Amino acid sequence: MLSIFLFVSVFSQAQSDINTFLKPSDTLNKPRRTGVYVGESVFLGATLIGLNQLWYKDYPKSNFHFINDNNQWLQMDKLGHMYSAYHLGSVGADMLYWSGASKKEQLIYGATLGLGFLTVVEVFDGFSQEWGASTGDVIANISGTALYVSQELLWEEQRIIPKFSFHQTSFASQRPETLGVSFNEQLLKDYNGQTYWLSFNIHSFTKDNFIPKWLNVAIGHGAEGMLYGKNKEAVENGIIQNPYRQFYLSLDVDLTKISTKSNFLKTLFSIFNTIKIPAPTLQYDDFNGVKAHFIYF
C-alpha cells in the first residue's frame, strides 16, 4: 500500500513538473527563446549533415542546376513538400509562442522554419548530378508556409490544416527498391498509399454553437497505379501503367480544439493533429467512380 502511495505521489509530481514546463510563457522568457533557437539550429544542422552523409555523399556532384519534375507521381511529392513546410513552420511558431516571443517574431522566424530547412535540402539536390533543384518543390514549400502565415494574419488561428494518412498497397512489392521494402520505407516512398488532406474546422467558419468545436470536414487527394514517376519511364522499362487521381470527402477531428487544462495533452494533441483521423469516407476517381469506405486510412 505504501509503495502504491509513493508511486502515485511521484507520478503526480512528475506530471505537474511537465505541465509547468510546457506551459507557454505570458511574457518573453529570454532563456527559453535562446534555447529554442539553439536547439533548432543544432537539430536541423545535425539533420542536414546526416542527410548529406547518408543520401548525397555517394552520388557525384555537379554544377547547381534545376530540373522540371512537375509531371511526376501526379504531383503527390509536391503535396508532401507543402505538408512538410506547413507543419515544420507550425512547430517553429509554437515553440516561439511557448517562449513568450511576439507574434511578429513567431511568424518571421518560426513559421519560416520549414521553408528554410527545405530550401537547404533543395540546394543539396541542385548540386547533385543524380537529381536537381525543382521549381515545383520550391513553390510547394512556399505554399505550405504561406498557408500557415496567411491564416494567422487573417484569422489568428489555423482553420485549415494539412493532414496525412497512409495505407499499404500492392504496388510496393512490385518495385520495392523505389517504393520501399518495410512499412517505414513505404510510408515515405509509396505515393500510391499516401493521401494528403485539407481539414476544415466547421465551427471556426460557422460560429454555430451546436457544432462541436473539434469537428472537421476534410477533402483529400491521392493517386494509384504508379510504379514509376512518369509513364514514359515505365514504358522504357517494359511496364504499362495507368495512374489515376483519387479525391476524398471525410469527417475529421481537430485535436487542438479539444478542451483540456493539461499542457502535456495539448502538446500531444498538437503532434497528432498532423494525421487524419480514420473515418467514414467517400471516394471518387475515373477508375472506380464513387466508392464509400466505412473507415478509410
Image (cartoon, rainbow, N blue to C red):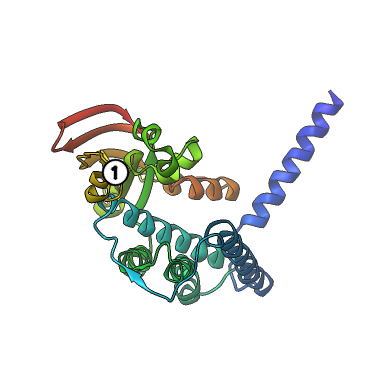
Residue 208 picture location, percent across and down: 26, 48
Residue 171 picture location, percent across and down: 34, 34
Furthest residue in direction right, as rendered = 2
Screen quadrant of the C terminus: top left
257 relative position to 248: left or right: right
- Seen at 37% across and 65% down, the residue is 141
Q: Is residue 61 visible?
A: yes
Q: Is residue 270 above or below residue 187?
A: below
Screen quadrant of the N terminus: top right
Q: Secondary structure at mark 1?
A: loop
Count of numbered labels shown in the rendering: 1
Which residue has dot 1 on it? Answer: 237
User: Considering depth in this image, is 77 or 3 the residue closer to the camera?
Assistant: 77
- Seen at 48% across and 42% down, the residue is 185
Residue 179 picture location, percent across and down: 40, 42
Q: Is residue 160 visible?
A: no
Q: Is residue 53 above or below residue 250?
A: below
Are there few (<14), some (14-19), or many (20+) residues within 10 Å of tag 1?
A: few
Give the quarter of the image for residue 22.
Answer: bottom right
- Seen at 65% across and 73% down, the residue is 34
117 relative position to 201: left or right: right
Give the quarter of the image for residue 159.
Answer: bottom left
Give the quarter of the image for residue 7.
Answer: top right
Residue 155 picture location, percent across and down: 33, 65
User: Considering depth in this image, is 21 or 261 the residue closer to the camera?
Assistant: 21
Which three-letter amino acid code belongs to the residue tagged 1? Asn
